[in-house]
Image: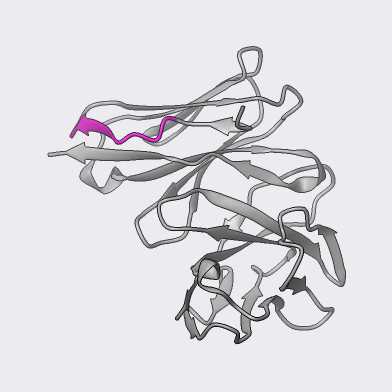
Amino acid sequence: QKEVEQNSGPLSVPEGAIASLNCTYSDRVSQSFFWYRQYSGKSPELIMSIYSNGDKEDGRFTAQLNKASQYVSLLIRDSQPSDSATYLCARGSSASKIIFGSGTRLSIRP
Amino acid sequence: NAGVMQNPRHLVRRRGQEARLRCSPMKGHSHVYWYRQLPEEGLKFMVYLQKENIIDESGMPKERFSAEFPKEGPSILRIQQVVRGDSAAYFCASSPRQAGGPYEQYFGPGTRLTVT
């Protein structure tokens, strides 16, 4: 079992709709979770970090964490073509290391 | 406030040569991480360093790869006797020094290494 699991996609969403990206993880003791966006040929960019159960909102982005289910998600409201990218889910491990999933490719169609 | 800096951005080496990749963390950050990303694949952790210390090198290949973060100057990832399989994007990330953690990591633009 992978430590951080994501559907590779591509996930295709019409412009203006809500994009929902999901991630599961295997380590019950993880306390910190992150979402990064990576455009093709570019470096990962931090979008959201979440440490507590529940929702955390930042503009059009909402991260949701459910530690009991070992599940974290990212919602993107009013999706724009510029949101088309690969989204990397990551969890913190001991000793300050972050473990990344393989990423979900998101495509927003006009 | 400058972000994480990496150089060179692109590096071409022939098989058997050495590659040196440099990373300067964000101002105020004392933790440096190196990752490798093969085309169409995810980020693979290589090594975690603080000034003058290697904290975790569990992702580093046992041979040919080494890393350092000296008291002065940038962190260096060194690959000796490169092979074609070393061709990849190498990203450096940094995070601030804080108790507990792990905390957010901020990435540099990466070095694209091509081995011919």
In the current view of this chain or complex, which residue is farthest to the right? B53
Quadrant of the rendering where the C terminus of chain A is positioned: top left
Q: Is residue B81 above or below residue A76?
A: below
Please state if A76 lies on the left or on the right of B76 as rendered. Answer: left
| Residue A91 appears in the rendering | yes
Q: Nearer the viewer, residue A45 or B91?
A: B91
Whether residue B71 appears in magenta in the rendering, the answer is no
Q: How is the image coloured?
A: one colour
Q: Nearer the viewer, residue A65 or B114?
A: B114
Kindly indicate the quadrant of the structure image that contains residue A94.
top right
| Magenta span: chief secondary structure | loop
Please state if A108 lies on the left or on the right of B98 as rendered. Answer: left
Where residue B6 appears, as percent x and y from the top left, is 56, 75
Residue at the location (77% across, 53% down)? Answer: B58
> What range is drawn magenta here?
A7-16
Please state if A81 lies on the left or on the right of A1 as rendered. Answer: left
Where residue B54 appears, as percent x and y from the top left, is 84, 64
In the current view of this chain or complex, which residue is farthest to the top? A68
